[in-house]
Amino acid sequence: YDPAFFRGRVLGLREALPGVCLGADVIAGFPGEGEADHRATLALLEELFPAYLHVFPYSPRPGTPAASFPDAVPLATRRARAAELRALSARLWLRFREAQVGRETTAVVLAQRRGGRLSAFTEHGIPVVLDGPDALVGRRIPLELIRVSEAGMEGRPLLE
């Protein structure tokens, strides 16, 4: 995808679904990718701040058109660029979760507990831990996102 197409899709989704948790798959070191291309990708991702990235260093697959493309990026460069993108992903994920603090949403409470607390996933895919009775398991409940936790967020049920 070119940057304009990607930007348009991300902004359109954000307008249609405020608070949406967007992820992006990114290939690091595709044949012909120069340093300026890599920097432009980082800048675009910083601008649009998806919640997280799935990062893959390019690896040639026999029989695919890209396997015969010229200007292969050295493996060490692909790995370094992938590491840089993963570090960006960690910053984006933290930034996204911080922006959700105080937001009211809904979540589905899962059957397993984590550290004695209930686990849930919000309507936008954020993992949440919260306190509450086992009767909440399997239910879709309203909650407030109250703080960032190590992997996701902590929530407070908004039940009557």
Image: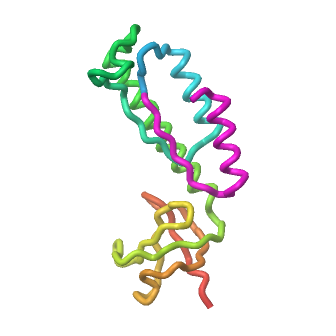
Residue 78 percent coordinates (x, y): 37, 22
When asked about the image quadrant of residue 115, the answer is bottom left
When asked about the image quadrant of residue 49, the answer is top right
Q: What residue occupies the far top of the structure in this picture?
A: 70
Q: Is residue 32 above or below residue 99?
A: above
- Magenta-drawn stretch contains 8: yes
Residue at 40%, 87% (x, y): give it: 134
Residue 121 percent coordinates (x, y): 48, 67
Residue 92 left/right relative to 71? right
Residue at 45%, 37% (x, y): give it: 87
Q: Nearer the viewer, residue 66 or 81?
A: 66
Q: Which residues are magenta?
A: 1-27
Residue at 39%, 12% (x, y): give it: 69
Q: Quadrant of the C terminus?
A: bottom right
Q: What residue occupies the far left of the structure in this picture?
A: 62
Could you tell me how many numbered marks the image carries? 0
Residue 143 percent coordinates (x, y): 59, 76
When asked about the image quadrant of residue 113, the answer is bottom left
- Magenta-drawn stretch contains 25: yes
Residue 112 percent coordinates (x, y): 34, 75
Q: Nearer the viewer, residue 80 or 12?
A: 12
Q: Quadrant of the N terminus?
A: top right
Residue 26 left/right relative to 79? right
